[in-house]
Image (spheres, coloured by chain):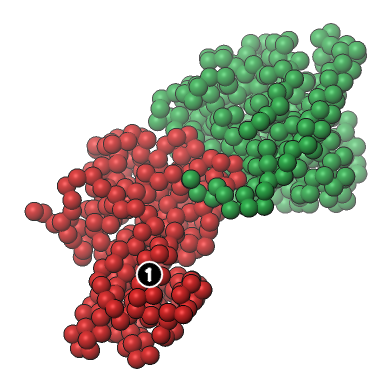
Amino acid sequence: MARPVSAVPKPAGTKRAETGAATEGRLAPGDAALLTMLHYMKLTRALEYRIERNLYRQGKIVGGVYVGRGQEAISVGAAMHIRRGGDESHDDIVSPSHRDMAVFLMQGFTPALVLAQYMGRRTGPTRGRDGNMHMGDLRHRLVAFISHLGDSIPVAAGTALTFRMHGTDQASFCFFGEGAASRGDWHEGINFAAVMKLPVIFICNNNQYAYSTPVSRQMAVRHLSERAPGYGIPGETADGNDVLEVYDAVGRAVARARRGEGPTLLEFVTFRMTGHSAHDDAGYVPKALFAEWERKDPIRRFEKDLLGRRLVDAAALRGMEARIEAELDEAVAWAEAQPYPEPRECLVGVYHE
Amino acid sequence: MALTTYVEAIRQGIWEEMEADERVFILGEDVGIYGGAFKVTEGMLERFGELRVIDTPISESAIVGAAIGAALMGMRPIAEMQFIDFISCAFDQITNFAAKNRYRWGAGVPIVIRGPSGGGVHGGPFHSQNPEMYFVHTPGLKVVAPATAHDAKGLIKAAIRDEDPVIYLEHKYLYRRIKEELPKEDYVVPIGRAATRREGRDLTILTYGAMLYPSLEAAETLSREQGIETEVIDLRSLLPLDKDALLTSARKTGKVLVVHEDTRTGGIAGEIAAIVNEEVFDYLDGPVLRVTAPDTPVPYSPPLEEFFLPNKDKILAAARRLAAY
């Protein structure tokens, strides 16, 4: 499969037995990692802007569009800990949800490849068989999500079961939203992983709405992590709009997993700054909530932090944005030039051939 | 030479594959310490250890989901459903995750989901079902249902070695009632190939699982009493279906009777009737008939269950009706 080479820096991932330096008891990324994180947060935002606001509205994307605007800190902060660059007995595995674009990018999917997927092209990761965030590739250690929320939880447990059987210190990263936590599969999968002490990091983006249903109608506990003791595993709730807080919490959970101490349930509180999908105007969400969470925007907040540390200045930020836009221009052009599948390819690939 | 029961044949097949391939492991409820509700996994925990013979919580969806995850990581999991009735709890993982994965993004899911199906043992509505057609309707899956000890072993081995998800339906009525001499050497029964159990020129019976035996008995009676020679074909595999075998026999006899223990509406008999009509209508001398269970849950009380299940007399009645055309 022809793939454009990404111009963006690859996230380094963490090396074996290294999860970041602790500052005042908190795991803190180094300077280069901080810039990588900012890059991927901005790339995610910009790519999803093109998808949702441009290509979808232009009719170039025909199916559903679900974006994670406002939630970028969670996938980026977590995915920094995914171990990569080795072989099957070294690399971690990850099951992203539908609002985790950054995870795909950080695992090596280029924006061009993602766009080919959205546009139903033959050179996309599912060759036009599936749309939007329903993509995966084991060479990138990405397990594809399905629309039946929560199904990934037992599957992630199964990947971790394999790591345990092989006696490695690999970990399985499993992302989902608070709505998925109401599914029976979610319960079965978490309990299964807990009973077997499997190395899974369960990462919830609690964006407070599942389609139109507010979190108060989804669960009777204040925080999803309160369920953790019920499974006999550690749980933690943190600010999902603070990428450093996410980085810290996930890093500690990963360390536990690698030490053989079992799964952790992490809840990151954030807000879905869009409707459920591109066709949904989210009229049911009080305007004041959007305004409140707009002020907590994870990217602006992180930029301010990095400006304060003098890691970047305004010119550097503008340069980063310009490079991203240029890459996306190229990616859109590449994806639009890709062929559609031949109609009869519908019949191919149901079984091993 | 010792005879091997159907249940022992399944156990042998799994055992040999676990010996030969360290990627193969089994997980399910009570498969370890207890050796399985029907003792299919007896002795395996001691031989292969608790990382390869895994007692799980009562969580069919997690059992299948975890099997999928392990398969994606290169393993060859066998997920046991304690009774196949409970497979409904894992329906979503099977039909949406496992079945569609290869088609969607090219990642095959080589798992086997197996368990005891079928009635005749007074198991009632939740320990007697034949759930094959939920899965036969799902592209991406394979569904097999052995009737003999030879096939039970050969098909479980083929299922374990297959690159795609296989639903392996073992019939609990046959577990200890059927025994035969098995080949000493390693063998598989290829998925998707039917077996002719009795040659005949006048009528074809297509069947599978436990219904093979009353079908064969009916064929003997027809031959003895009326000189009607019935060809009996054991489908063995429902998805993929061995269309060549059934169409060849239909062309030869011109009369097709389908017998299954599954309920009537949406059973495989309807599908076979459609295939026969589409492909060999000109050869037919009568309608495709079917003998099936009625469209009810499987009842518990002996007179009710006896009424529910197809048997030799019901098959004979339908065969005589068809033979009269």
Residue drawn at (71%, 27%) of the image: A4
Residue B177 appears in the rendering: yes
Question: For mark 1, what is the residue?
Answer: B248
Q: In the rendered view, does A234 fall on the left or right side of A30?
A: left
Residue for point 73% across, 10% down: A31
Residue B196 left/right relative to B67: left
Q: Which chain is green?
A: A
Above or below residue B250? Residue B157 is: above
Q: Position of residue B85 (x, y in %)?
A: 42, 62
Residue at 40% x, 40% y: name it: B76
- Count of labels shown? 1
What's the colour of chain B in the image? red
Amino acid type for the residue under numbered disc 1: Thr
Give the quadrant of the C terminus of chain B.
Answer: bottom left
Picture layout, residue A218 above or below residue A258: below
Question: Residue at 67% across / 48% down in the picture?
Answer: A342
User: Going by the picture, which residue comes out furthest to the left?
Assistant: B1
Whether residue A276 appears in this view of the structure is: no
Q: Give left or right: position of B147 versus A257.
A: left
Q: Which residue is at the far top?
A: A310
Q: Quadrant of residue A333?
A: top right
Question: Is B24 or B299 nearer to us in this picture?
Answer: B24
Residue A349 sits above or below residue B168 on the image = above
- Residue A124 place in picture, x, y as percent: 68, 38
The percent coordinates of residue A50 (x first, y second) are 84, 35
* Percent of width and height locating residue B177: 21, 65
Compared across the picture, whether A91 is left or right of A105 comes to left
A89 vs A304, nearest the viewer: A89
